[in-house]
Image (cartoon, rainbow, N blue to C red):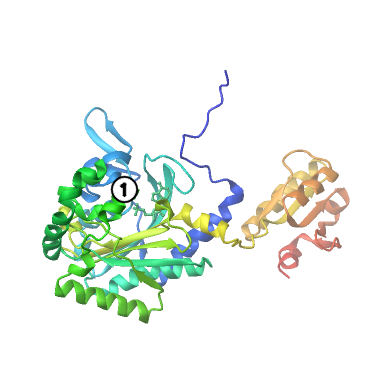
Amino acid sequence: MSNKIYAPKGTNDILPENIPLWEKIENAAKDIAGRYGFKQIRTPEFESTNLFERGVGDTTDIVQKEMYTFTHRGKESLTLKPEGTAPVVRSFIENGMSSAAQPVKLFYLTNCFRCENPQKGRYRQFHQFGIEVFGAEDASSDAEVISVAYEFLKELGIKDVVAKVNSVGCPTCRKNYYEKLKAFISPKLDKLCDDCKNRFEKNPMRLIDCKVETCKEHIQGAPLMIDNLCTDCKDHFEKVKEYLDAMEVEYEVDPTIVRGLDYYTNTAFEFIPKDNTKSQAAIGAGGRYNGLVETLGGPKTAGIGLAMGIERILIQLEEQGITFPLENVTDLYIAPMGEAAKTTALKYATIMRREGFIVQTDVMNRSLKAQMKYADKINAKYVAMIGDEELEKGVLLVRDMQTKEQTEVAFGDLPGFLRK
Ligand code: AMP
């Protein structure tokens, strides 16, 4: 029997060769969010379970089936964060951010954990870039949030992703709509899937986006929220569209994008690849949640947010053949020959690193030939050789690994030589 230990199902190592790509994506997220005035927030990896029960909703798949929940010392129920919004809202309330200058604009890059059936683009541990805006009710804020996602994808060169937008109204117009929707569905309810049956009372709007084929057929022709908005919600949605046009965001109205819990209001949106209709294809999603801060015990505060899946972005980059030139990872390899040179090499390496260069030297007691081979493998731009002769003269024999040209350089001149 093998005693090898494997990574848990649905998790991935991010290997050193992939880190530059991850950093590229994370830096693009930070840059874009920063340009809009968002500040970073980091919340714990686990929270009280009831934060998600209340903040995500106990009729959602996340809460019903996907949370990693454990009991701490037989007392407190804790859950690994399945999403980023509820923790940020908790922190907003706990840290009294409602008395800061409004709007409060926060972004995060976080791990998320959901116990799902792993497949391409769907993992048990994944990563999200998300933003949240508190205190802004105006439609321009909705447009700004959607445009952050749009500009982020644009910055990475991802094409053919469409922003699908919808309005889920407010509790008032939703009440009338639910009556109409339920009247339409009631006669067919026994033909729908168990999820739909369960949601019928508590969250009927979610029946609109059921992915089961037979349900889809029965739902066809159902009244849509977008056709039943009250005047205020209708005006808000019209404004969102107007502002999206002004911000040059390409979008489509899609009435099947729904949320349906009480704290969701007005705008709901998703970013979906144009040629892909699979449910796990959404690259990002978000919406307005004017009731959420109150639901979690805070003061009445408007809110809107968005979360993008980093792994889904990686899939798009790969499918669209988008690559980024990788940085040369080693500026200088110092190759000592002999014990005395080795001490000097370590000393020089330290000084050069303090100067800001990426420097490696021999820690394997390799021959010069083997060191040159290694320097080649790690893509060193320069190799500086030190033997007895160089030691005596206080110089290094510097080889440009591309041109193969060799120059004797006094150590004091080395930083300038490398920077030229
Ligand atoms: P959600 O909170 O479910 O709307 O998710 C927001 C975004 O996170 C989705 O649009 C996906 O890009 C990503 N996402 C959600 N669940 C997963 C998962 N299990 N694995 C990878 N990415 C995910």
Residue 390 seen anywhere in this rendered image of the structure = yes
Q: Residue at x 82, y 52 (%)?
A: 385
Q: Residue furthest right?
A: 389
Q: Residue at x 77, y 46 (%)?
A: 374
| Residue at the spot of label 1 | 214
Q: Is residue 99 left or right of residue 419?
A: left
Instruction: Point out residue 369 in the picture as x, y percentages from the top left corner.
Output: 85, 45
Query: Looking at the rendering, in which quadrant would you find the C terminus?
Result: bottom right
The vertical placement of 210 against 138, above or below, is above
Q: Position of residue 221 (x, y in %)?
A: 25, 61
State which quadrant residue 234 falls in: bottom left
The answer to whether residue 33 is seen in the rendering is: no
Label 1 residue SS:
helix
Task: Decide: is 184 above or below 167.
Answer: above
In this view, 270 is above or below 191: below
Q: What's the residue type where badge 1 is placed?
A: Thr
Please state the horizontal and vertical placement of residue 365, each as a whole percent of the image.
77, 38
Residue 398: image x %, image y %?
Answer: 81, 59
| Image quarter (top left, top right, bottom left or bottom right) of the N terminus | top right
Q: Residue at the bottom extreme?
A: 246
**Left/right of residue 152 with respect to residue 17 in the rendered view:** left
Q: Within 10 angstroms of label 1, few (less than 14), some, or many (20 or more) residues?
A: few
Residue appearing at x 50%, y 42% in the figure: 12
Answer with left or right where residue 227 lies relative to residue 176: right
